[in-house]
Image: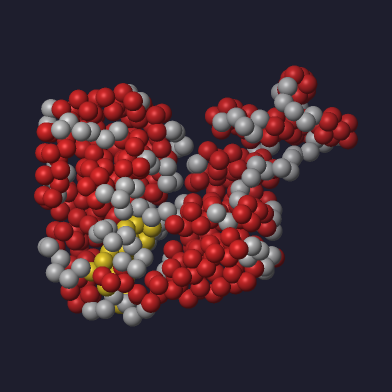
Amino acid sequence: MLKKLWLVLLLILPCAVSGQVYLFKDCLQPTTPELVKELEAIQAPGQTLDNHIDELRKIAYQNGSAQQTKTNLAAFILRKVTLNRNLTYEDNEDLILEASDLVPGDYYLESLWGDLLYFKGDYDKALTHYDNALYKSPDDITLHSRAGLTAMQLMQYEKAVGYFEKVLSTRPDDFYTIFSLGRCHFELKHLEECLEYWEKALTLAKDDRDKTAVQNSINQAKELLASTGDATREEDQRFVIHFAGNSQEDLGDITFAMLEEIFFQVTDALNFQPDVKINVIFFLTEEYYKIGRDWSAGSAQGIKIMVPLKSGYKSPDYVKGLLAHEFTHTIIHLRTNNRCPLWLNEGLAQYQEFAAANGSPDSMRSDYDGILQREFIDKRSFVNLNQVPAVMNSSSRADISKAYIASYLAVRCMADFYGEQSFDSLLSALGRGKTVDEAMTEATGKNMADFQEEYEEWLRNL
């Protein structure tokens, strides 16, 4: 089960806008007062700007041209990119690359480049360019803030803390930075530090909406702290595990072995290994359901997996399947920068769950058999994959189960027709910022509408 609480909290904070990444507004200046004046006069893209660029290219690309002429051309090119902010990254990429050849490593270029990649959703590359800009201007607080937000998108929370602490050294009462530091520490399970930041953020909140959002965050952190305060903590090179109560005695010896097996199963299947440690928290059952949905067997939030310790687990294989399911969500989130459609996310999670628990991804949970027979085979009642989020929000447990089964079967259909390597192609395209239609076409040759038809035909032959 996926949790999006912290994304929601960030989005509903109106004053958080000041901390969000926006298109870099500073610009590279030409080297002569005349060109500076001409550049400042251009406030919209069009023929005037293009004519300047054409004339400057003739000078800059002559043999033996001075660096000044290249800087002048780059300044006008970057102005065009900035004025064309509504275009896609691909539409601006040639201009950015040309400017990079003219003024490699330039502060203004790297800052703008980072913003464009951020909006594209390519957070890895965006952070690289922000770091390049910070190398040129290490005390740029605005860039540290942007880099921190980008690191959070990548779930690199320890790295994000470093950026945000630099911001806080200059802006000690910046509400957004303090709230973000709290979130980073929450994800790292540094709950005492998290509460310190959020309680300070509460005193700085400027309106009731902000106060409510922060208070909700504080309440959940306190619930988590109460639930795991006496937990036993162990870690290895890949996982940090927290065992509530005496659960370590029951699970400690088998959990690391399970997670080791699951780690390689899932990362090999999805062709991605995380560069951060994943927190796995085993809750006492009654404590888990204070923060989780009452029907969920577990949940994944960022780099944190939470599992309720139900008395009398069905079998070690059940636990293995459950952990594989939630670990898959974490890997997909990291691999796609949280751009994966719900049907694919849940379908792949179940595919890996069944492989871990049952020895084969084609062997479903036994409680799915009746619904599969009744709804999909007897009634031919299928689910449009684009409607899976709405069906999963239903109050009907039967509808929710049907959406999960539909998601799993869609992934099985993909594996049957296009092989499991199509998962890698699809997730890779989503991670590069492609739309679902574009990513599906790249991975399967079919857009979503065509795949839906193919999938339903596949279902009729079950």
In which quadrant will I find the C terminus? top left
Front in this rendered view, residue 415 or 163: 415
Residue visible at 38% across and 77% down? 226
Residue visible at 46% across and 70% down? 219
The answer to whether residue 342 is above or below residue 77 is below
Residue visible at 59% across and 39% down? 116
Front in this rendered view, residue 223 or 66: 223
Residue 431, given in percent of the width and then of the height, sits at 42, 40
Residue 112, given in percent of the width and then of the height, sits at 64, 41
> In this rendering, would 50 be left or right of 32?
left
The answer to whether residue 192 is above or below residue 179 is below
Residue visible at 58% across and 65% down? 211
Q: Number of labelled discs? A: 0
> In this rendering, would 440 be left or right of 284?
right
**Residue 444 in sight:** yes
Using the rendered view, name the quadrant where residue 95 is placed.
Answer: top right
**Residue 132 in sight:** no
Front in this rendered view, residue 231 or 298: 298
Residue 162, given in percent of the width and then of the height, sits at 56, 63
> In this rendering, would 88 be left or right of 62?
left
User: Which residue extends farthest right?
Assistant: 34
Residue 299, given in percent of the width and then of the height, sits at 32, 58
Using the rendered view, name the quadrant where residue 307 is placed.
Answer: bottom left
Q: Which colour scheme is used?
A: secondary structure
